[in-house]
Image: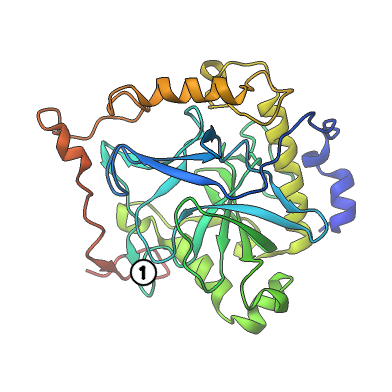
Amino acid sequence: MLSVTARALSSSRYSHRPLAALTAIRWHHSKYQTNQLGGPTGTPKHHMYFNHQGNPLSPWHDIPLVADKNTGLYNMVCEIPRWSNAKLEIDTKSPFNPIKQDIKKGKPRFVANVFPHKGYIWNYGALPQTFEDPEHRDIDTGCVGDSDPLDVIEIGQEICAQGSVHPVKVLGLVALIDDGETDWKVFAIRADDPLAHKVSDINDLETHMPGLVDATVDWFTKYKVPDGKPLNKWAFDGKPKDAEYARTVIASTHEAWKRLVLSANSDANSGFGLTNVSVESSPHYLMPSDASDAFKALTDRSPGQMCPDPPAQNNEADPAADMVPSAAPSKWYYVDSSGSVAN
């Protein structure tokens, strides 16, 4: 295995020269606000949009990746609070990239409770301004990216709110292989957590939170089994990589995001929602006033047209039914190491 330094020089992950610094980015330093449209969590039309001082923005493109250059902290956007079950994610396909309720076959998706866990066992979110490129094959995992921002699992003691943004310290990562694609999971801790000053790398977690890394690998290995899927697979046999390695992955996915947001492809041609209010050199940049007009036009549509989600099943005659949250899972499952569910 190459050292991180040697790997950075030889990896195809670094075969692209870093892009020149993006010009005229307006970083927003005060708190972000969110507004919920289309129904509460657990409903098919649930969308949470972001704004700054009343102006709409994209949590993917407009919240900076780096929270503090001096301390090496990154920003994390919380999509899913700890212990909850609803599968929520930044919508990379739609304008302004709201956090949306994930839908499968017209119904809201929830993760199952798999022994000994309850829902998501950490605060789950994303690193903004990152992109796991589906056209790039990673030299170490041998797989392409999954077309999403980097996933973050935040292990601090507080339960984060959906849509909250937190400076975090990166500790390491693991590499899930999901349907043949690399799906990095970055371990991080909020900078304001009481434990943050004691942990700086993945090995520190075993000292201060023994069993957490193993529990994380167990969770991701088994969580799809109750839905009829096989056990998930891992690069590196599920062993975590350290903070330095994680930072190389973050840097390369940030470069991939730059290429995406600076591309001349339209949203329709690229398949991604690239509208932004901070990257003035991007063809998809909007002035704040134009962004407000575009957002108003988007949200003035009927809830069924607001975002390109599939319709909920059997609710055509009663649209109000789409505003009633689906029940979270009321069962739990025991999944053994072979992937069998005890019945």
Residue 201, relative to residue 317: is it above or below? below
Examine the image and state in which quarter residue 37 appears: top left
Query: Judging from the image, what secondary structure is the residue with disc 1 in?
Result: loop
Residue 226 rendering spot, x and y as whole percentages: 31, 58
Q: Residue at x 62, y 21 (%)?
A: 284
Q: Residue at x 64, y 78 (%)?
A: 195
Q: What residue occupies the far left of the structure in this picture?
A: 317
Question: Which part of the image, by quadrant, shows the C terminus?
Answer: bottom left
Q: Residue at x 69, y 22 (%)?
A: 282
Examine the image and state in which quarter residue 316 appears: top left
Q: Which residue is mark 1?
A: 118
Residue 81 rendering spot, x and y as whole percentages: 44, 60
Relative to the observer, which residue lies in front, 292 or 164? 292
Residue 67, relative to residue 313: is it above or below? below
Relative to the observer, which residue lies in front, 223 or 257? 257
Examine the image and state in which quarter residue 114 appears: bottom left
Question: Which part of the image, by quadrant, shows the N terminus?
Answer: bottom right
Mark 1 neighbour density, 10 Å: few (under 14) some (14–19) many (20 or more): some
Residue 227 rendering spot, x and y as whole percentages: 31, 53
Q: How many marks?
A: 1
Relative to the observer, which residue lies in front, 116 or 19? 19
Q: What residue occupies the far front of the structure in this picture?
A: 53
Left or right, 6 with respect to 285, comes to right
Residue 112 rendering spot, x and y as whole percentages: 32, 60
Q: How is the image coloured?
A: rainbow
Q: Residue at x 55, y 19 (%)?
A: 290
Q: Amino acid at mark 1?
A: Lys
